[in-house]
Image (cartoon, helix red, strand yellow):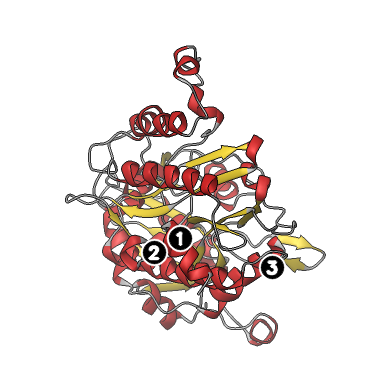
Amino acid sequence: MKYQAINPQLFIENRKRFVAQMKPNSIAIFRSNYEFVRNGDANLDFKQNSDFFWLTGIDQEDSFLVLFPDSPDAAFKECLFLKQTNATIAVWEGHKYTKEEATETSGIKSIFWNDGFENAIRSKINYAENIYLTLNENDRYTYKSPSSDLDFAKKIQNDFPLHHFLRAAPILQRLRSVKTEIELNLTRHAIGISKKGFERLLNFVKPGVMEYEVEAELIHEYIRNAASGHSFHPIVASGASACVLHYVDNNKPCKDGDLLLVDCGVDYANYASDMTRVIPVNGRFTPRQKDVYNAVLRVMRAASKLLVPGTMLMDYHQIVGKELMEKELVDLGLLTMEQIKKEDPAWPAYKKYFMHGTSHFLGIDVHDVGMRYEPMQAGNLFTCEPGIYIQEEGIGIRLENNLVITHNGPIDLMDEIKMPLEVEEIEALMNR
């Protein structure tokens, strides 16, 4: 791993929080993600299962975590099973965790090699009444590829059909959605790298550069600052391409007079940042571009203030669209009051120009798990990213910051480090 070691207290406390929610006489088993084949004998970059990492800090394939607080064998109250290295693996694949390193990383003292996992678990699992298993229950997700969670769940259910099986995901979603200070500081570190990447772009972008060159500048800055890479495929969209919400071709020239929308994030220590900025390719906004930009910025600032304990996410989206964005669109001459009066309530008029949500949970995953239909609470980490997309004018503007909810109001983690955002800041930095 490129990143610095994480304080193992994070994972120790995370496991305590999870175990406290388990039913008596229950065992919970978690499996690491698969390594996926790209083509031939090449693998895709390994990305750890988010729940597994949150509980252990172990960033390696072929690993198992067992939590059995009522185990009659003390060694199995919490234990890890890891891939044992050998001379061949060391030569061809490189370093793997030693038992001592795994304990240092996770805070777990009982470490075993995974070649003995099935025999070991069979001898212990029958002392439990309930088995907790996890699946990817992120409500944005649908199964499109093999899943280690799903495959493992099917195998355990087949091997132990008389046990009572329970879902770990509802517990984990609530716990993961409330960030600890260690987690927030990891996110702050990722955001700090994002700032360096954005400032690099302000010195680089000019008429004639290609969108993929901009993407290359970002990854250069991320890797040189010990990030694993992008937290998602970056959107680098110039001109009218910015009106395509998930534009990822990144293959067009940045033209004089156009705007460039960059939606990107850093993956640092498996924690994500998520930032969107819009800059003028030639270093100067036109009056119209500036008006639209400032309208989006006003909505973002006003929406951010609504991210407080007790707010319902769905109500928040409605307020941002109908009260904040609608007014700006009328002032920009994009909507009339007559159009608003005749709108379809199921698809309000403002959605012609602002068709997506304003905020999503952020954390280990860029679209992190969270309780979408429960009140916001202190410790939740959200993006705030309104946008206006005017296809007929070739203008697409979205601005996005990352904020943590506290009892004393939201803290904008990007404002905290003075991430450039105002029109005047951006123009000054591009023309210095």
Q: Secondary structure at mark 1?
A: loop
Is the residue 116 above or below the residue 399 in the image?
Answer: below
Q: Secondary structure at mark 2?
A: helix
Q: Which residue is mark 2?
A: 187
Nearer the observer: mark 3 or 2; the answer is 3
Compared across the picture, whether 20 is left or right of 78 comes to left
Q: Earlier in the sequence, mark 1 or mark 3?
A: 3
Q: Position of residue 215 (x, y in %)?
A: 64, 65
Q: Nearer the viewer, residue 327 or 21?
A: 327
**Mark 1 belongs to which amino acid?**
Ser
**Mark 2 belongs to which amino acid?**
Thr
Q: Earlier in the sequence, mark 3 or mark 2?
A: 2
Q: Secondary structure at mark 3?
A: helix
Q: Which residue is mark 1?
A: 273
Whole-number angstrom distance, CA of label 1 to CA of label 2 = 6 Å
Q: Nearer the viewer, residue 388 or 51?
A: 388
At label 2, counting other C-alpha atoms closer than 10 Å, the crowd grade (few under 14, some 14-19, many 20 or more) is many
Is the residue 39 above or below the residue 291 in the image?
Answer: below
Nearer the observer: mark 1 or 3; the answer is 3
Compared across the picture, whether 254 is left or right of 110 comes to right
Residue 60 position by quadrant: bottom right
Q: Give the farthest residue toward the left.
A: 408
For image coordinates 65% across by 35% down, the residue present is: 392
Which numbered dot is residue 213?
Answer: 3
For image coordinates 82% across by 65% down, the residue present is: 40
Marks 3,2: beta carbons within 8 A? no
**Mark 3 belongs to which amino acid?**
Glu
Residue 6 position by quadrant: bottom left
Q: Position of residue 347 (x, y in %)?
A: 51, 21
Whole-number angstrom distance, CA of label 3 to CA of label 2 = 26 Å
Q: Position of residue 164 (x, y in %)?
A: 41, 38
Whole-number angstrom distance, CA of label 1 to CA of label 3 = 21 Å
